[in-house]
Image (tube, rainbow, N blue to C red):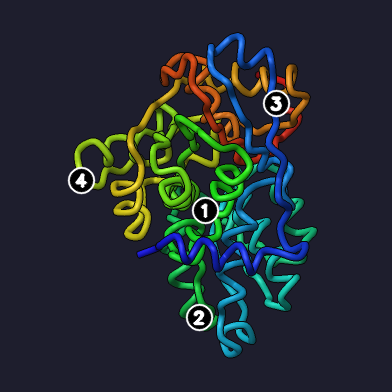
Amino acid sequence: MVFYADVEAAAARLADGVAHRTPVMTSRQANEVTGAEVFFKCENLQRTGAFKLRGAYNALAQFSDEQQARGVLTYSSGNHAQAVALAGRMLGIRATIIMPSDAPAVKRAATEGYGAEIVEYDRAATTREALADRLATERGLPVLPPYDHPHVVAGQGTAGQELCEDVPGLDALLVCCGGGGLLGGCAIAAKALQPDCRVVGVEPERADDAARSFRTGELHTVAAPDTIADGARTPSLGEVTFPLVREHADAFATVSEEAIAAATRFLCERLKLVVEPTGALAFAALLDGAVEAEGQRVGVTISGGNADLARLGSL
């Protein structure tokens, strides 16, 4: 399990210029259209363009000398890939990344730019987990999953920790959810620092496995969901994240593709932020009315800004 002390330890590892303490932004227009006082935690301005560096660095920094010498293997459609590639470069650990053939070009280019080796696969032919198992055995590499690891969760929780420290008296915290690492970590931090704050996970309607798992208490999966929020295409919560989300989150909301697109456009036009659709999930729930928060102080995570500009324009 993961505890707030683990989040605090992760924050110490990420200090001194390893990860940015990202800004919290506000918008009068966002407040007017939602009826709430909204505070955006801008992880799109984090190094690598997403919150993922927090968990990747925290995990790799705790590798043994023997593990570091062998290198690391992971799988990701983009943001975790970039994070592991950069964290590996910072720590001198060789990174091998399994990426789908249809991964956003901007994320693949950045991952290669950080010096990682990319192994491409076809989603229709195999799963990334199966390929990772085979490569780990063949190459003798330790595997760092993108979200289902206690050190990753603790690192991601530092985003929620910073928000709760910077903005007192939050009534609610909305967190986008794919595999549950960010949601689990932020919920742990919020409950430790602001126990009365309601933590809500947000998913696409087309990828609502975590919402259904949360409500039923049984793990649900969604195979290759067709959503513009590519970071939320994870099939399910994990063995680590499922119980953490069940214990620390208070509710779930789901949003349509149209709502995700509208929130992405709002953040670009009104706040002048480059945000990928997954990064706009939490705000989409507030903007679309999936979460009622009139008169409340609401924290909203913007999880990433690694948008393919050609695709972004089509929104």
Name the residue type under label 2: Glu
Which of the 4 image quadrants contains residue 221? top left
Q: Which residue is mark 2?
A: 138
Q: Quadrant of residue 262?
A: top right
Q: CA distance from mark 3 to mark 4?
A: 35 Å
Query: Given the image, on which type of amino acid does mark 1 rest?
Result: Gly
Give the secondary structure at mark 3: helix
Task: Give the foreground label among 3 and 4.
Answer: 4
User: Alpha-carbon distance for marks 3 and 2?
Assistant: 39 Å
Evaluate if marks 3 and 1 touch, with contact meaning CB atoms under 8 Å apart: no
Q: Which mark is residue 264?
A: none
Q: Nearer the viewer, mark 4 or mark 2?
A: 4
Q: Name the residue located 46 percent from the left edge and 80 percent from the top edge.
A: 137
**Mark 3 residue crowding within 10 angstroms, few (<14) / some (14–19) / many (20+):** some
**Label 3 with label 4: CB-CB less than 8 Å:** no
Q: In screen coordinates, is 158 left or right of 45?
A: left
Which sits earlier in the primary sequence, circle 2 or circle 1? 2
Residue placed at 63% from the left, 42% from the top?
Answer: 166
* Residue at which label 3 appears: 312
Q: CA distance from mark 2 to mark 1?
A: 33 Å
Which quadrant of the figure contains the N terminus? bottom left
Considering every residue shown, the one lying at the far bottom of the view is 66
The residue closer to the viewer here, 97 or 293, is 293
Left/right of residue 82 with respect to residue 259 in the rendered view: right
Residue 280's place in the image compared with 41, above or below, is: above
Is the residue under label 2 in contact with that under label 4 (CB below 8 Å)? Answer: no
- Residue underneath mark 1: 157
x and y, in percent, of residue 261 in the image: 59, 20
Q: CA distance from mark 4 to mark 2?
A: 34 Å
The residue where tag 4 is placed is: 218
**Which numbered disc flags the more N-terminal residue, 3 or 1?**
1
User: Disc 3 vs disc 2: which is toward the camera?
Assistant: 3
